[in-house]
Image: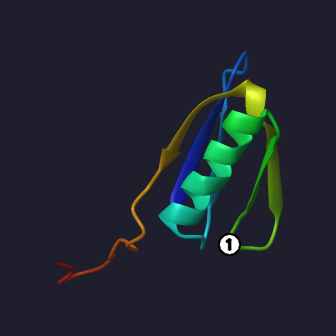
Amino acid sequence: MEIRIGVQNSPREVVLESNDSVAEVSAAVSAALKGGTTLSLQDERGRTVLVPGPAIAFVEIGSEEKSRVGFGAR
């Protein structure tokens, strides 16, 4: 699923594809925002993305379903 993170005072968003569930990502974001700690997420290639909790402006979590590509996709 795609995750977009807006960072305060930065014109660009952090965008990553993750294999984590919506519940796991939501829990990690909530913990970082409540505790003022660093948000740590891993993308589908195994890379780790770190964002300081106090600098998070917004987090957009996409759906867990993979989009279908090609003819006959319904």
Say if 12 sits above or below 25 in the image. above
Local secondary structure at mark 1: loop
Q: Residue at x 53, y 69 (%)?
A: 21
Query: Which quarter of the figure is the C terminus placed in?
Result: bottom left
Residue 58 in percent (x, y) is at: 56, 32
Observer-nearest of 1 and 74: 1
Q: Residues within 10 Å of mark 1 (few under 14, many from 20)?
A: few
Res 6 quadrant in image: top right
Res 25 quadrant in image: bottom right
Horizontal side, residue 24 vs residue 22: left or right: right
- Determine which residue is flagged by label 1: 44
Q: Amino acid at mark 1?
A: Glu
Say if 72 sits above or below 41 in the image. below
Residue 64 in percent (x, y) is at: 42, 69
Observer-nearest of 32 and 55: 32
Residue 41 in percent (x, y) is at: 73, 58
Q: Check the image and name the residue furthest to the front.
A: 35
Q: Residue at x 59, y 64 (%)?
A: 24
Q: Residue at x 83, y 60 (%)?
A: 48
Say if 5 sits above or below 24 in the image. above
Res 67 quadrant in image: bottom left
Horizontal side, residue 19 vs residue 37: left or right: left
